């Protein structure tokens, strides 16, 4: 009921333990920095909505909320400015329903890629990209990328990006880190690990990736699933929204272009321009962005509906700068948001495994804020 408050800590069903062994393997399609816990997303969705409700995520990232909502029979509207995020979310929400169909699509795209192979001129590829791959592996991967674009297969392109770089033999690159692309030639010198620098069989690795993805698939999805590419301030607004569940950018603390640069280059053969902000500009930009997006969506949220905001805490040494404090200021100071009351809040620690750089001290936890529309 509108106005009925609850303590979020009483519904915390997510745990510190990894849920990798039980999650849908679609969540493991490709890595993403700052990904929301799947168990957290599922618990929040179940708390603030019922099957058939409309869930909106304007900062969808890797599509955790979108996938869990669709698998829970909610109508989903998601979007992001990051082409990698949009690709991953579309790949998860519109993956072929059966493994056999996915394998047929793979074979069709691979056959087309052999026709694209002759057009691959590695001289046009930036040197930093070429440094990650054996030339023939790169040529074959780029041809498959072009075939995915021609056949409009977000799922297969996401599979390619999911095996793009790592030091393990099942991936395509020379030895490198998995999440953020850095070569690890010092740890794996060529003279001692020569097999890691040989040409890779792209097709067999893609087939293995597709098969791994289908180990645990959702039984079914909601009929209505929409994913949009672009600025959240111009996000298409559905009607009768039950909940906006999202994790807005952490005051630009994460550099999504830098951290995903190799995968982003493969998507568009270019990198989107990043925005460099000083500490003061980060807070102002975050506040303006969140205020604009929430104002725009507020009128579409039905009475009793929710804003659920999972915000990464960036303290900068003072309480005033904490992201949750800035978020609460947005709701206290924005006239269009005065119809929403803070109904629940809790703090959750981000384990080291979820952070791209373990020594990074800026964001070590996140606060979940639930606002309910009471009038």
Image (spheres, helix red, strand yellow):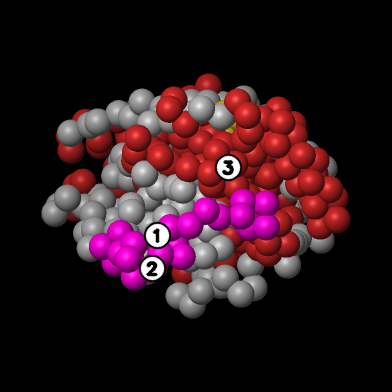
- The answer to whether residue 194 is magenta is yes
Q: Give the foreground label among 2 and 3.
A: 2
- Quickly name the residue at label 1: 175
- Label 2 vs label 3: CA separation? 22 Å
| Residue 107, visible in the rendered structure | yes
- The answer to whether residue 215 is magenta is no
Q: Which mark is residue 266?
A: none
In the image, is 321 to the left or to the right of 65? left
- Quickly name the residue at label 2: 193
| Image location (x, y in percent) of residue 306 | 57, 46
- Quickly name the residue at label 3: 141
Q: Which residues are magenta?
A: 185-205
Q: Secondary structure at mark 1?
A: loop
Question: What residue is rendered at 73% in x and 67% in y?
Answer: 215
In the image, is 248 to the left or to the right of 85? left
Query: Closer to the N terminus: mark 1 or mark 3?
Result: 3
Q: Secondary structure at mark 3?
A: helix
Q: Looking at the rendering, which quadrant does residue 373 occupy?
A: top right
- Label 1 vs label 2: CA separation? 9 Å
| Image location (x, y in percent) of residue 341 | 47, 46
User: Camera-side residue: 118 or 165?
Assistant: 118
Q: Are marks 1 and 2 in contact (CB under 8 Å)?
A: yes
- Label 1 vs label 3: CA separation? 17 Å
Query: Vertical placement of 208 versus 258: above or below?
Result: below
**Label 2 Cα neighbours within 10 Å, binned few <14 / some 14-19 / many ≥20:** few
In the image, is 31 to the left or to the right of 277? right
| Image location (x, y in percent) of residue 49 | 68, 53
Q: Are marks 1 and 3 in contact (CB under 8 Å)?
A: no
| Image location (x, y in percent) of residue 6 | 52, 62
């Amino acid at each position: 009921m509108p106005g009925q408050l609850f303590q979020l800590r009483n519904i915390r069903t997510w745990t510190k333990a990894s849920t990798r062994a039980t999650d849908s393997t679609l969540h493991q399609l490709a890595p993403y920095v700052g990904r929301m816990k799947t168990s957290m997303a599922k618990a929040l969705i179940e708390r603030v909505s019922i099957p058939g409700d409309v869930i909106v995520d304007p900062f969808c990232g890797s599509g955790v909320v979108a996938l869990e909502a669709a698998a829970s029979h909610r109508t989903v509207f998601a979007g992001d400015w990051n082409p990698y995020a949009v690709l991953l979310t579309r790949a998860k929400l519109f993956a072929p329903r059966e493994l056999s169909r996915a394998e047929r699509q793979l074979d069709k795209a691979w056959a087309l890629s052999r026709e694209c192979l002759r057009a691959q001129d590695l001289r046009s590829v930036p040197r930093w990209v070429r440094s990650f791959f054996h030339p023939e592996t790169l040529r074959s991967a780029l041809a498959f990328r072009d075939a995915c674009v021609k056949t409009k297969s977000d799922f297969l392109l996401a599979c390619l990006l999911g095996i793009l770089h790592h030091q393990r033999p099942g991936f395509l690159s020379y030895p490198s880190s998995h999440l953020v692309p850095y070569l690890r030639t010092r740890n794996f010198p060529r003279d001692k690990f020569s097999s890691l620098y040989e040409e890779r069989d792209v097709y067999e690795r893609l087939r293995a990736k597709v098969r791994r993805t289908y180990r645990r698939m959702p039984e079914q999805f909601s009929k209505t699933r929409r994913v949009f590419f672009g600025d959240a301030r111009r996000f298409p607004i559905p009607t009768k929204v039950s909940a906006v569940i999202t994790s807005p950018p952490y005051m630009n603390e994460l550099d999504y272009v830098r951290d995903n640069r190799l995968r982003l280059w493969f998507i568009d053969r270019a990198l989107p321009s990043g925005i460099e902000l000083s500490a003061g500009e980060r807070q102002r930009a975050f506040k303006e962005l969140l205020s604009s997006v929430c104002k725009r969506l507020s009128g579409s949220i039905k009475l009793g509906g929710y804003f659920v905001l999972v915000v990464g805490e960036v303290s900068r040494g003072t309480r005033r700068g904490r992201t949750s404090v800035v978020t609460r200021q947005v709701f206290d100071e924005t006239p269009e948001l005065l119809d929403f009351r803070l109904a629940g809040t809790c703090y959750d620690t981000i384990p080291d495994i979820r952070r791209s750089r373990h020594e990074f001290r800026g964001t070590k936890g996140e606060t979940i804020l639930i606002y309910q529309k009471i009038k």
